[in-house]
Image (cartoon, grey):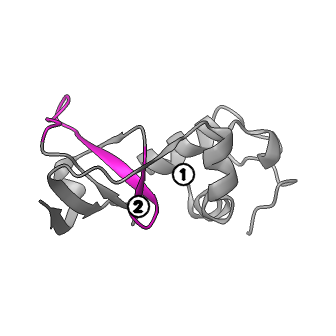
Amino acid sequence: MKLTDESKMPFGKYKDEKMINVPASYLMWLYDTGKCNSDVKEYIKDNLDVIKKQSGIKQTSIVKSPGKLVVTKNGERGRTYNSKGIINGKLPVYLEIDKFKYQETAILCDPTTLQIIGFID
């Protein structure tokens, strides 16, 4: 079932709230952690630009710093920095917003779930 802004959130902390009223930060958390069903994931993808703006995710241009280009288990492209180490067994990944533009804040990903698609020297 395709969700709209007027549809009710089907599960979780905001169950039965209209999707438009579910906090953007919660939707991004669900999306980034993969804890959403296919309907919610599709709704988030359809509204990703607006949700990112509402959640306060900022974008930054690519920094000439060595790292890897990766794809997350959710299929999102991002980059790592060699200077940033593993944090509690997770690797910081800065998701791509636009070509060569990345979020200012990272999500933490299990390194074994990342697909390396390139290198930045």
Q: Residue furthest right?
A: 6
Residue found 53% across the figure and 41% down from its top = 58
Residue 84 is one of the magenta-drawn residues: yes
Q: Residue furthest front?
A: 64
Front disc: 2 or 1: 2
Q: Position of residue 105 (x, y in %)?
A: 41, 37
Q: Position of residue 44 (x, y in %)?
A: 63, 57
Q: Position of residue 92 (x, y in %)?
A: 27, 41
| Span of residues in magenta | 83-103
Residue found 18% across the figure and 36% down from its top = 84
Image quadrant assignment for residue 72: bottom left
Q: Amino acid at mark 2?
A: Asn
The circle drawn on residue 36 is 1
Q: Which residue is mark 2?
A: 74
Q: Are marks 2 and 1 in contact (CB under 8 Å)?
A: no
Q: In the visual, does 52 lie left or right of 94?
A: right
Q: CA distance from mark 2 to mark 1?
A: 11 Å
Mark 2 neighbour density, 10 Å: few (under 14) some (14–19) many (20 or more):
few
The one nearer the camera, 16 or 116, is: 116
Q: Secondary structure at mark 2?
A: loop
Q: Secondary structure at mark 1?
A: loop
Image quadrant assignment for residue 15: top right
Q: Position of residue 73 (x, y in %)?
A: 33, 60
Q: Amino acid at mark 1?
A: Cys
> Of label 2 and label 1, which has the lower sequence position?
1
The one nearer the camera, 89 or 2, is: 89
